[in-house]
Amino acid sequence: MSDTAKSDSKSGAKNPPAASAVKDQGYLVLARKYRPADFSDLIGQDAMVQTLRNGFQSNRIAQGYMLSGVRGVGKTTTARILARALNFETDKISEPTIDMQEEGRHCAAIMAGTHVDVIEMDAASHTGIDDIREIIEAARYKPVSARYKVYIIDEVHMLSKSAFNGLLKTLEEPPAHVKFIFATTELRKVPVTVLSRCQRFDLRRIDIRELEQHFTSIAEKESVSIDQDAVSLIARAAEGSVRDGLSLLDQAFARAESGAISADDIRAMLGIADQAEILRLLGELFSGDAAAALPTFKTFYDHGGDPQQLVSDMAEAVHSLTKAKALGNKAAEDVPEAARTQIEEMSGKLSMAILNRAWQALLKGYQEVGSAPNQLSAAEMVLLRLLYMSDLPSPEDIIRALHKMKDQTIEPAAPATGQEPGGGRVEDATAHFSNSPAARTVNGRDHIAAPEAESMTRPEPIAHSQAEPQTAVELRSFHDVVALIGQERDVKLKLQLEDYAELVSFAPGRIELHLLPGANEGLASELSNKLTRLTGSRWMVALSHEKGRETIGSQRRKQEAQEMEQIRAHPFLEQTLAHFPGAEIIGIKSLEEGGPTAGKPALEREQPEDEEPNER
């Protein structure tokens, strides 16, 4: 880092460039005070440094550089260091180099952002083509004092389309004395034509361990005592951003009263809970202990914890448990020592299905808590959801049980010797019922048929294997066909049959229809395939040009209209409507208690083929 602690032997000067600014400006925040001054101070960007080193040594210096990465990883700082390297000059060195062992003639001004030949522009506030025209015009003139005229454009993705187009020609063939350095957090918004003209470097997020070492070193230089667990919490909260971490560290230094900073201080500052306590809460949730889990969560809230942040902490703990479940001890390297053993023990007891369900519930719960009017209540609802999800069977268990039931349906297991008729297992009882005359399995569904339906005439069945079960569904009219489609919840096909299909003739295994305008072209084939699959028998659906019977939908509407007229004419209803002016009849509901069709499914009601079909 560029601070007063940097060795004089390395620089050959009393202070590095950034340190002199500290005296002039008084107190500087840590993010500025410990800003890197050369490539040796950069942390976590070894690949980029090695590439630049090789390029400078072989004199392969590009005319443009594109630096991308998330906030706070050092894009602008790297751009200034690169500009310093391009213009590095001492009494002994007169060529570009990244090995800047001492301060050169232009270094201080470049790092301070005041050098006349290193022009920095924020594209967020200079987005238009006019700003780019100024750069193009100025680029024709040679630098005043430095070797190269360097243009650093920050947040370059904010430039307009016309500005990018205006820059292309100069960027591709710039004057020999001009270099461009771009920085962006949104690389995908930069046109490919610009990217192809630059040497691109993706600055990666800084590893947690590297951040911990960096922050510990700064704390030592600032003579501040801080626990290692506190440093770890700050490094994790930084999410790979050096600047964010230094801002949090600055805040922690200001918070410390006695000069010693503990992990509890950082948790209170960030509003996060101890990971060991979060894991204990998850253990109570996974064990279904509501009496312990909800008070524990309320305690976190009473101590200043944010409900949404607590849900986020729980999701992070579930992520750690899932990684430990999948990778074993390798996944625990990034976990604090205090919680490592606890994570290993919990991950061994929980299944991957439970952890995945918990992750999905917490992820959805995080969004719900953020938009809820009462965040505490919303967070408690998320916890209750986890409590009752913990004892649900996994999808693998459900599939395994269904396969077992299917196998027992085909080959029912014999009861144990001496076993009472009603004392068998649930699986045995299921198999016995599925094999009874009143039930058959069709395409994985159990259809229950009335005993009298067993003797009905059936269409010629499709050839089945000996182990394949037969159907018990009998269709004796077109109304039965429509009712069966309705039971399968194929609403689109049911509406087509009711409103656009006139029945010409019906026989078991064969239907002839006349389609009205507006019907689907493939209605006949769709109905044929559907019936064949549902009944297990071959059905042929033919189309005719002859007019057929009135559609079922039209019949139903006529009948409803007749019923409405009859009801309106009833003396009691007339008196009722007279006492309540403006009242309307909006619907009719039949009372089926005691009726001739009460309690009977639609497929079992008699429907003579020589009479007009009637669903009511």
Image (cartoon, rainbow, N blue to C red):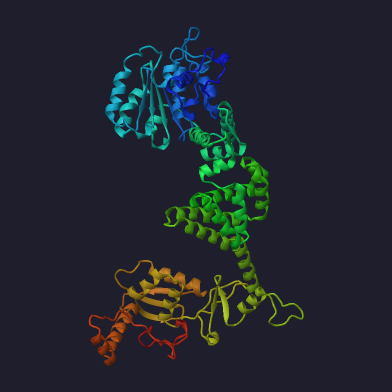
Q: Position of residue 210 (x, y in %)?
A: 58, 32
In the rendered view of the protein, which quadrant contains the C terminus? bottom left
Q: Quick check: 507 left or right of 295?
A: left
Residue at 51% across, 43% down? 270
Q: Position of residue 437 (x, y in %)?
A: 59, 82
In front here: 44 or 194?
A: 44
In front here: 510 or 246?
A: 246
Q: Position of residue 393 (x, y in %)?
A: 60, 63
Q: Position of residue 410 (x, y in %)?
A: 64, 73
Residue 167: quadrant of the picture: top left
Q: Is residue 329 visible?
A: yes
Q: Is residue 411 visible?
A: no
Residue 561: quadrant of the picture: bottom left
Q: How many marks?
A: 0
In front here: 142 or 111?
A: 111
Name the residue furthest bottom.
571
Q: Quick check: 522 left or right of 454?
A: left
Residue at 41% across, 77% down? 482
